[in-house]
Structure formats: C-alpha cells, structure tokens
Amino acid sequence: MADRLSPSLLQNLQARVDPELEVLIDQNSARFQELAQGWTNIGRQIPGAIVLPETEQQIQETVRWAVQSSVPFVTKSGGHSEWSSINERGIVINLKKFSGIEIDAPGKKAILRGSILSKDVAVALAAAGSFTALGNGNTVGAIPYFLGGGASVTTSITGFGSDQILAARMIDAKGDLVQVTDEKEPDLLYAIRGAGQFFGLVTELTIKITPLSELGNDQGVIWVGAFVFPLERAREVAEAMKPLMDDSKHATSGLIMIMAPSPARNKTLVISARYTGNPDHAKIAYKPLYDLKPLMANGGPVPVQNTSDAREVLCAKGDFKRFGVVGLRRFNVDSFLETVKVWQTLVEACPDAINTAFNFQWDSRPPKTPQFESAMSLHDIRYWQNNLIWHTNVSRRQLVDEFNDKSIKIMRGSDKSEYADFQNGTRSGPIELRYRGPGKLDKLKALKKKWDPTGVFTTQLLD
Ligand SMILES: Cc1cc2nc3c(=O)[nH]c(=O)nc-3n(C[C@H](O)[C@H](O)[C@H](O)COP(=O)(O)OP(=O)(O)OC[C@H]3O[C@@H](n4cnc5c(N)ncnc54)[C@H](O)[C@@H]3O)c2cc1C
C-alpha cells in the first residue's frame, strides 16, 4: 500500500502558497468524491489530496512545493483521460478554478487559460466570428487536447489542434515559468506541438484561429447528419462508403459506427456524417447512402460550435471507457466485415459492453500540413479506427480490451510499416508509432532529458 500524504505536509503547502488555497483531503466529503471522478474508471485512483489553485502564481507555487517536497502530482483539466489520476502518495492539481479565453479576431489568435473546455472555446470563438480545430468532446479540456495532437472535424481546413499552437506559458519540472515562443524556446515549442503533456504544466496557450468564412458558407455551419442501417446490410453499406470516403471532390468526414444504440439496442450500422462547405451540397455528396434507402436518414446545417452536441452522451463520467484509436491507410471492406463479427461476439460475451462501438473514421480530404516541423507526426493520416470501449463490469476489463485489440489488428493488416498511434488516445505500445519520422523521437527524447530528466511530467520519452 502507498503511504498517504501527511496532513502537516499539506498544511505547509497552504502556508507557502496561500492560506485560502483550497486543499481537499477528506476522501469521504462530497466535494472530494465529485472531483475525484473522471470520464473513465480505468486506472482511476484516489489521490492523497486535490488542490484547486485559482491563479497562475498559485499553480506555479503548488508545482514548486510538490517538486521540492518530492510529492508526485498530476494535472487535471477536463478529466477525460486515464492519466489525470494518482494514488494516495500524490496530489491532483485540478485547474477547475483557473479558466478563461481572450480573443483577438483581427489578429487571428486567442489565448486559452487553464481548464477551459472545448465547447466553451468553440462558443466564444463563434461569437467572435471564428473557429479553430476542436474535437468531438464538448467537455474535453481544450489545452490538453491541443497539446496531444488534436484531431478535428476541420483538420483538412485548419490542420490538427497542435498545428494551431503559437505560444505557451508553461511551468517546467523545476517549477519555473517558461515563455514558450518561437523566438525564445523554438525547440520546446516543437515539443509541445503534439507531445506537450510530457513537458510541463501549460497555464496558457496561444492558438491560431480561423474566420468562420473558411468553412465555405456564410452561416458558420457544418452539415451534420446520420444514416442508419440494420447491421445485416454491412457489406453493401461498406461498399458504397469506400468510394465516397476516397472522393476528395466532396468534403465529407465522419464515422461508420458498429453499435447497438439505446433504447432499442438493435444491432445497427450508423454513418455519423459531416459535410463542410455549402450545406445544400451534402445531399449530392451522400447520394450513394440515400440511394441505399436507409432505415433513417437525417441531417442539416449546424453552427460549428454545436457540431459535437449530438455526441454529448459520450462525455458522461464513470464506467470503464477507453478510445482504441489508430491511424490507418485504407478502408478494406472485408476487414471491416470481420470487425462486425468481432463486435457481435464482444457484445454477446460481455453484455455489459453494449455501449461499445467499433468505429471507422474518415476524412475525404487530407489534413492541412503546417509550414513548421513539430512533434505531431500524423499529417499523412485521414483514416482512423476509433473504437469507443465502454463497459460496466470490472471483471471483464481484460476481455473487452482483447476484443478491441483484435478489431484493431484486423483493420491494421500485416504491414507494420503503416502502423500509426495517436498520442491523445494511448500511452502504451511502442512510442515510435506516436512520434514517427526520421529523428523525431530522438529529438523529443533529448528535449525531455533537458526539460524533465526525472519524469515529473510522466516518464514518457525517458524510457
Ligand atoms: C468523449 C471524448 C471525445 C474526444 N474526442 C477527441 C477528438 O475528437 N480529438 C482528439 O484529438 N482527442 C479527443 N479526445 C481525447 C482528448 O483530447 C484527450 O484525452 C485530452 O487529453 C483530454 O483532456 P482533458 O483535459 O479532458 O483530460 P485530463 O485527464 O484532465 O488531462 C489529460 C492529460 O493532460 C494532462 N494535463 C491536463 N491539463 C494540463 C495542462 N494544463 N498542461 C499540461 N498537461 C495537462 C493531464 O495530466 C493528463 O495527462 C476525446 C476524449 C473523449 C473522452
């Protein structure tokens, strides 16, 4: 068993930072229990304390105290990962009370602070006539999302989330505040654009923003729709999707989802579809699906800041959840049909995993590539296997993962040179699959040794 943090050590933290600093140590209190929750219970641990700083200075002092007292810590923003959790020996620095956004629309940039959530960024930017690369989770912390790569529905227009990073204010492993800019720390800027969660605690991120007009319409909208088919029709739907997903004439993107939606729980294929440009053209782009006469088809223009609202249910806290995400080079119909069988076996063997969906994600257009080099190495990927693992019975933890691994293995095929992992999705497996390309991993490892040689911010890139 780990030794719990001593209360006197924590009193010393308050005395040093601010007597008013909120430090929660009573594991039985409602506030502690609420804040100890996260999106997933996989790997969830109970910390020795939860600390809630309100200012950048308080955050910095807390990090300094932790480093000098050899108290391990993790930072938490939106709590949607498996990694903002720590045991009784350590503390969680929860940024809930430090959050904000400042927008400079004419200058095409915005400053994000602390724990600001993705939806709050999207709403504030839209009100200022802008958008940026944001993902599918409204309550995902925006800063960690950008630091870890950031796959978005607008990747073909904007590039990945990490490509939007212009500068940062970061507290390093010594507790010093570093201005990460191209002029002052170009190598560190390179590293935080895709591997940022391993280098420090980012209090502020300056990002590039894009005028709404670049969405290709006057209304700042993206067309969002769904096509529903019985699972037995998987082959004909997959065969229709293959050319559609490869046709870059139309800016389509979305997910082919093998799932059993609530409440009916019928085994279903749902095409969760998006179209960027003139929303009236979505009907033309998705004609092959309408022609198949789905059980249900809907769709219409949605303001860009609301495009993930329909997926809000995925953001619920609790249960055992995980994304199984890997980059792919192609869509193989036969492989896809094999994964349908794997999913069916999974939900029969593990009825508690009925919320699990095996998803193939596509973008008909490639990611926009930035003018600079960075840690992010996935600009050659426009296809993903993006499985949502979701079950409730802890005894099936390993079994459910095995089904996920099996489906990913099938979709990847046997050519290992094509394998690519997504750093926002995993921290296990060979790290060279997350940071690909000549010299990239060596450069990141050298930078990690310079900035965080003892692994204050994880031991990733040190092993
Ligand atoms: C429903 C859902 C949808 C998602 N959709 C997408 C998507 O479309 N595209 C995509 O790319 N990803 C997506 N993700 C993954 C998500 O972007 C990452 O898991 C992200 O890191 C979560 O951030 P968080 O603040 O919510 O989580 P947290 O668990 O709070 O933080 C994640 C990691 O970042 C660290 N961290 C937190 N704050 C800071 C900080 N200020 N400075 C440095 N490190 C920090 C934490 O210690 C932890 O290691 C999705 C996840 C979920 C659950």
Image (tube, helix red, strand yellow):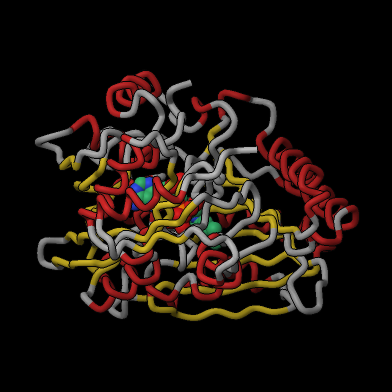
**89 up-or-down from 20: above or below:** above
User: Horizontal placement of 59 versus 282: left or right?
Assistant: left
At 24% from the left and 44% from the top, the residue drawn is 170
Percent x, y of residue 288: 63, 66
Nearer to me, 311 or 7:
7
Nearer to me, 454 or 219:
454
**110 up-or-down from 67: above or below:** below
Find residue 276 and report its image quarter. Answer: bottom left
Nearer to me, 349 or 288:
349
At 25% from the left and 48% from the top, the residue drawn is 61
User: Horizontal placement of 405 versus 182: left or right?
Assistant: right
User: Horizontal placement of 458 versus 104: left or right?
Assistant: right
Percent x, y of residue 367: 39, 47
Judged from this view, the residue extending furthest toward the front is: 8
At 68% from the left and 60% from the top, the residue drawn is 257
Find residue 401 and report its image quarter. Answer: top right
- Residue 251 visible in the snapshot: no
Percent x, y of residue 398: 78, 42
- Residue 105 visible in the snapshot: yes
